[in-house]
Each structure stands twice: as structure tokens, then as C-alpha cells.
Amino acid sequence: MSRTVTVALCTVTLFVAVTSRAAAPISVMILDGESGGTYHDWQRVTPVLKKVLDETGLFATTVVTTPPPNGDFSSFMPDFAKYQVVVLNYDAPDERWPAALKDAFEQYVKNGGGFVSVHAADNAFPGWQAFNEMIGVGGWRGRRDQAGPYWFFKDGTLTSDAGAGTAGSHGKRVPFQISVRNSHPITKGLPAAWMHQGDELYARLRGPGRNMTVLATAFSDPQNNGSGRDEPQLMVLSYGKGRVFHTTLGHDVNALSSVDFVVTLQRGTEWAATGQVTQKVPANFPTATTVSYRADIAAMDPRFADGLDPLTARPAR
């Protein structure tokens, strides 16, 4: 496949909504504070998520950071109800959150709060049933058969496989093509297929898959430790009255710089909060053969000076 790269060097494309900016901005909490290891650098990812959302003019974002893994969670209780949507850049084991905190988040989403799960957030809380129903599928942290079946597309249809095996895998971080599977406000106006900048292509995810619509998939190439299946990458779900947007994309700043990540996060967050998408698709959105990335975002990683894809020296999960 021939691949070209489009770079936004100086001009940042801002996405203008149809609705008036006189309306109150959508209140967003970005929740961070832990990841499964140094391979997920949440401290660098969160500023990118905030920039991407704030630049639209649609959102007012607040970053809420949990106590550290060995910290005291007994008094940590964010006021979820103050926000229309929670964007989760967070991955922790089941025991990290007290029952009261888990219940508060469950009730928030069940009662209509929006929820966006970004990349390794779907590694979190393998034994928390409600959380796994919210995200639909997840990986790692000991997930196996009990987590639910594998989910993937086969012959154009969402298919499940309850066979034995661990959950979660990916190959080396290289560009890959994403294909739209279902019409939805988030994907409206996007091309049927596009190239995504070098990232982890999550595969072999397992979960209950209830009330889940897969918006887009990517082929997990067996030559790159892949499953040989068309794996879910973008999903929407309902949990009670709440709307959930789940993106598996966004391993690091390099991946976040891909224009398709920027656009789908912005549109997915608006939809999770309001049920609508008012943002236009930018002219520099990638095509089926063309990767397009934001140099201003990529440069937020100090390692960008070493090149766009300095992958060989970094551990990955």
C-alpha cells in the first residue's frame, strides 16, 4: 500500500460547531493518575487530551488526578454530577477504588452522565462488572474467559468467540487502516476508510459486549503479532441513561497527534455528553492511503526531536 503523510506545520485546524458559541460550554472532567506501567505515560497524554478538547471552543475541561497507587482514597470523591462527560485516561487494578467511589461513578453514568474511555482505560478494573459493561470489551490485567467472549468483525458482521484464552494483545506500533462499520453521528462525514498514525492496534479484547455498537475496526495483521481478525477500535455503548464512547487508540503523544484521533475524540466526547455531533470534518482528515498528523501535538513529546516514530527504544504493552 502506498502511504503518504500530511503534516499540519503551522496552522492548527480548529473545528467549528454549527451551534452558537454563546451556548454554555460542555463541562468535561479528564480523570487521570495511574497507568499499568511506564509504557503508558498518562502525565504526557492528559495535556494533549485537554488541548484537543479545549481548542474546539465547545468544552470546558477540568483535570482531576487521583491519589497515587499507595495513596489514601478514603476521601477522594469527585463530584461527577458537575460534569456532562468524564474522559478516562486511567488504568488501575480492581482494589484501587473503594466501593463508594465505584458506586458513585456507576450511578453517574447510569443516570445519564457521559463517559469516554481512552486507550488503556479499557485495561482497568477487570473484575468490576459495571465498568466492563460500560466499556464493552477490555484487555490485560488477568482478563480471560470469565470476562466474556472475544469480539470482532467477520464477513461484515459483529461476531463473538467464547473460546478460552487471555484478553489483550498488540503488535509493533505502525500505521494501520481503520474501516467504518456503522453509521453514527460520530462517523458521519468521515471516509469509509482512513490511515491512522503509528499506534498500538488492540486485538483479542474480551467483554460482555452488551448494548455495544462497533463504529470502526482495523485488521490485526498476523505478521505483526495480530489475530488475523478485524478488531474493534471505536465503539459506542449505553449504560442506563448514559452514553459511552470507547476508543482503543492513543497509546502515546505520537499516536494522539494523528488527525483522526483528534477528530474522533472531539466528536465522541460531544456525543457522549449531548447525544449530538455538531463539528465539521476538517480538510486534513486522513484518507485510505494517507496518514495525517498534527505537528503541534507531536511536538508536545520531547522525543519528537528524534523523529515521529522513535519506537525501537520504548517498551510497549
Image: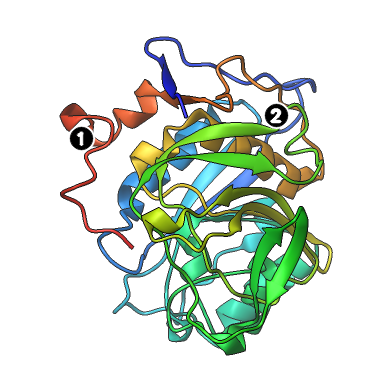
| On screen, residue 116 above or below 178 | below
Residue 315 coordinates in the image, percent (x, y): 22, 58
Instruction: Name the one closer to the observer, 199 or 61.
Output: 199
Number of marks in the rendered image: 2
Say which amino acid is labelled 1: Pro
Question: Residue at 36% across / 65% down in the picture?
Answer: 35
Residue 252 coordinates in the image, percent (x, y): 36, 46
**Mark closer to the chain start, 2 or 1:** 2
Q: Which mark is residue 146?
A: none
Position of residue 172 in the picture relative to residue 209 (left or right): left
Position of residue 185 in the picture relative to residue 51 (left or right): right
Instruction: Name the one closer to the observer, 87 or 100.
Output: 87
Instruction: Name the one closer to the observer, 155 or 259.
Output: 155
Marks 2, 1: nearer the viewer: 2
Question: Can residue 183 be seen at all in this image of the molecule?
Answer: yes
Q: Which mark is residue 190?
A: 2
Query: Neighbour class for label 1 at 10 Å: few (<14), some, many (≥20)?
Result: few
Question: Residue at 45% across / 86% down in the picture?
Answer: 95
Question: Can residue 89 be seen at all in this image of the molecule?
Answer: no
Residue 56 coordinates in the image, percent (x, y): 60, 26
Say which amino acid is labelled 2: Leu
Question: Residue at 29% across / 79% down in the picture?
Answer: 70
Quadrant assignment, res 27:
top right
Q: Which mark is residue 302?
A: 1
